[in-house]
Image (cartoon, rainbow, N blue to C red):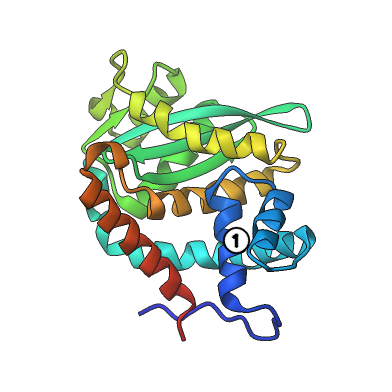
Amino acid sequence: MPNPVSFRYFKTSPEIIQLAVMLYVRFPLSLRNVEDLLHERGVDVSYESIRYWWHRFGSQFASEIKKRRAGGMQSSNWKWHLDEVFVKINGERHYLWRAVDHEGEVLESYVTKKRDKKAALKFMKKAMRRFGSPNEIVTDRLRSYSAAAKELGCADKQVTQRWANNRAENSHLPFRRRERAMLRFRRMHSLQKFASIHALFHNHFNSQRSLSTRSTFKLNRDAALTEWRSLIAS
């Protein structure tokens, strides 16, 4: 059982800190939006405090989620969907590479300045070190993928059919909404940190609403919230 996150030396209750971080990362809200939502619930905190809590505890919460979900990610090497999106940092174009499995779970996020073979190779190696080699790799027709797959010895697993990569395209939407609420990013490090944490939060709370009945969805949502609250249990 993972050790709970420590809130030693913090005067604000752990429940409030955890709620603030969850609202900020999970939903497309600004820091001031979260401040207003907490104020409506009788909690008077500054948006700067929420910013500090997010930087201080966001990665710790994400790490705990990763540990608890590690056992359930063993089937993620069946089929991968790889895709990259353009993200501007201070007016300069960067690329956010993302690997998504057949169930929509975000496996890996990686930020680079280029999208050449070297970047694709490093991204794919990073994902494979954690999950192993997949049985099938779905990509678009960017040549960097085929060159990297050939060097890794898995070119025969690559699929580039039209519309085959819609799952990866759809998985970008929650991040895009979150990016607009944050008014873009200013550093590569900030983008990498937030993309990785946001992916784990999304995986944890994503209950596949459209693929299950209302009763099943409610059970999955309650289970996700119960496990989320247990992260700060002593």
Image vertical order of residue 72 relative to residue 5, above or below: above
Give the mark count.
1
Above or below residue 108? Residue 114 is above
Q: Residue furthest top?
A: 162
Query: Of residues 59 and 19, which is closer to you in this image?
Result: 19
Left or right placement of residue 186 versus residue 137 in this view: right
In this rendering, position of residue 59 left or right of residue 146: right
Q: Quadrant of residue 211?
A: top left
Identified at 60% across, 61% down, the residue is 21
Seen at 46% across and 86% down, the residue is 234
Q: Position of residue 70 (x, y in %)?
A: 32, 62
Q: Quadrant of residue 2?
A: bottom left
Q: Residues within 10 Å of mark 1 (few under 14, many from 20)?
A: many
Q: Position of residue 25 (x, y in %)?
A: 57, 52
* Residue 106 point in image, percent of width and height: 40, 44
Q: Label 1 sits on what residue type?
A: Val
Q: Residue at x 70, y 36 (%)?
A: 184
Position above or below: 112 against 40? above
Q: Seen in the image, is 78 located left or right of residue 199?
A: left
- Does residue 148 appear in this view? no
Q: Position of residue 116 (x, y in %)?
A: 54, 25
- Residue in view at x 28 percent, y 27 percent: 155
What residue would you read off at disc 1? 21
